[in-house]
Image (cartoon, helix red, strand yellow):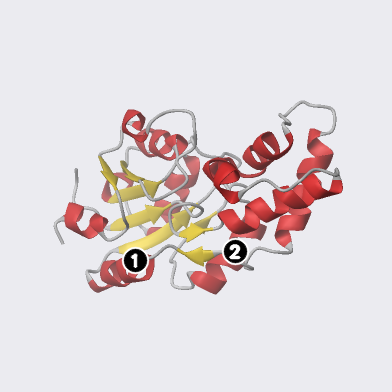
């Protein structure tokens, strides 16, 4: 691995714990349909898939179903009203980011979340981010490498000089496609499709500050 000049992060499940607010929007749709709320623990693993994951687990809907698109729009409209009700930074994230800055490493965010939803969270909780690339910024979403490459461009770094940290298999796929080193955030949502060790990460971290140890800081 080339010594990194920058660290790029996924947002949900890596820097911020947004599961309570996303789950609340899923349960709002369930209530609208006369269904009881689901526990956060059941919805949490699906947060990394955004609206698709919440509608899939929360309402049993898949893209292509007759009412999927209308409910996706309703879900996103509800979520836009509660972006920062319970969403917080993961423990150790502030200390990690401060340490990266002290060591002269730049950092940014690459998320599949639409910029209109990601920007308010970034501005409120992560105002020192030097780049924010949302899922609608490049015409492609992870696992396509375009969002990661755009973030590297904005930071003025070659892709090989960037590290990408995320909690979803698509994050590692995107990192490989962008020729960046991918590191898995084991504290995140992780999904349900495959074990984290099968994603092909350069490392699996159990908590954010372990990134400094892995970098040899």
Query: In the image, what residue occupies the spot 49% across and 32% down?
Result: 192
From the image, tell me which residue sits under label 2: 119
Question: Which quadrant: the C terminus?
Answer: bottom left
Query: In the image, what residue occupies the spot 51% across and 66% down?
Result: 88
The spot of residue 25 in percent (x, y) is 72, 53
Tell me whether the residue at label 1 lies in contact with that at label 2, contact meaning CB atoms closer than 8 angstroms. no
Question: Which quadrant: the N terminus?
Answer: top left
In what element is the residue under mark 1?
loop
In this view, 56 is above or below 80: above
Query: In the image, what residue occupies the spot 57% across and 39% down?
Result: 140
The spot of residue 210 in percent (x, y) is 24, 56
In what element is the residue under mark 2?
helix
The answer to whether residue 46 shows anywhere in this view is: yes
Left or right: 26 as drawn, with respect to 121: right
**Relative to the observer, which residue lies in front, 24 or 51?**
24
Left or right: 191 as drawn, with respect to 137: left
The spot of residue 51 in percent (x, y) is 67, 43
Left or right: 99 as drawn, with respect to 169: left
Report crowding for label 1: few under 14, some 14 to 19, many 20 or more residues within 10 A (C-alpha): some
From the image, tell me which residue sits under label 1: 92
How far apart are labels 1 and 2 at the CA level? 21 Å
Which quadrant of the structure image shows residue 171? top left
Residue reaching furthest to the left: 216
Query: In the image, what residue occupies the spot 26% across and 70% down?
Result: 99
């Amino acid at each position: 691995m080339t010594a990194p000049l920058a660290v790029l992060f996924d947002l949900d499940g890596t820097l911020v714990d947004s599961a309570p607010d996303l789950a609340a929007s899923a349960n709002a749709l369930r209530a609208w349909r006369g269904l009881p709320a689901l526990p956060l623990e059941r919805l949490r693993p699906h947060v990394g898939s955004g609206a698709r994951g919440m509608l899939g687990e929360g309402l049993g809907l898949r893209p292509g179903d007759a009412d999927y698109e209308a409910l996706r729009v309703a879900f996103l409209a509800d979520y836009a009203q509660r972006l920062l009700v319970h969403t917080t930074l993961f423990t150790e994230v502030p200390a990690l980011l401060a340490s990266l800055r002290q060591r002269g490493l730049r950092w940014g965010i690459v998320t599949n979340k639409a910029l209109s939803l990601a920007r308010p969270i970034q501005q409120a909780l992560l105002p020192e981010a030097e780049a924010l690339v949302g899922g609608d910024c490049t015409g492609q979403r992870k696992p396509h490498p375009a969002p990661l490459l755009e973030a590297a461009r904005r930071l003025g770094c070659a892709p090989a000089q960037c590290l990408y940290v995320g909690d979803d298999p698509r994050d590692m796929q995107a990192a490989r496609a962008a020729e960046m080193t991918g590191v898995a955030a084991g504290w995140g949502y992780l999904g349900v499709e495959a074990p984290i060790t099968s994603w092909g990460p350069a490392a699996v971290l159990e908590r954010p500050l372990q990134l400094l140890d892995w970098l040899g800081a």
